[in-house]
Image (cartoon, rainbow, N blue to C red):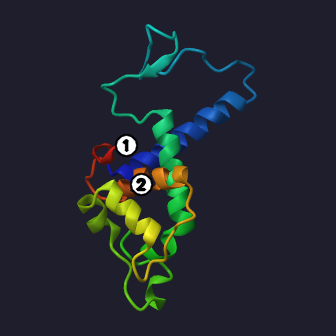
Amino acid sequence: MTRRVFLGMLVVIAVVGLCAGCGGSGTAPPTEPPSHAVPSTQTGEAEADPQSTTPGWDEARELSLGRQVYVDNCMRCHGDEGLGDGPDAASLYERPADLREHVGHHSEAELTEVIRRGSPPMPAFKDLSADDLEALLAYLPVLVPGDDHSSHGH
């Protein structure tokens, strides 16, 4: 299963779960933590099971924000899958980079520099907030087939 399909399924599950909690069944949603959470001995709150491969809510939220930053700023040139084939790509004097090739070969620091400074024909994104940049850097590895994005520091 590709990471894109997995993330799509995660979003669908989250939406269905929210709808079930809002439905007219008259019963409250369960108050037990999800099965991938274990109680913390220090705070009494649930924390992610370190052996779970399911992304936690914070990671899912960051990937969702990263996807939105990508859609808003990158997709028109780099395309939905990062191939450099977005709707504006044909009008540029140079084809946009295939992100699937570049993301896995550059550190987050290098990617940050390229995003902030630009790389013709890509404009500089100096005004991207630190949170948006961090979320984008967490999302970009999702575009790389077979890449485990946790190896990029997220």
Asked if residue 88 shows in the view, the reply is yes
Nearer to us in this view, 53 or 98: 98
The residue lying at 36 percent from left, 50 percent from top is 3
Q: Position of residue 82 (x, y in %)?
A: 39, 68
Image position of 120 (left or right of 75): left
Nearer to us in this view, 65 or 28: 65
Q: Point out which mark residue 19 bears.
A: none
Task: Residue 114: name its quadrant.
Answer: bottom left
Determine which residue is flagged by label 2: 137
The residue lying at 50 percent from left, 83 percent from top is 88
| Residue 131 higher or lower than 77, as above or below | above
Q: Amino acid at mark 2?
A: Leu
Image position of 24 (left or right of 143): right
| Residue 35 higher or lower than 74, as above or below | above
| Residue 147 higher or lower than 113, as above or below | above
Q: Point out which mark residue 154 bears.
A: 1
Image position of 94 (left or right of 70): left
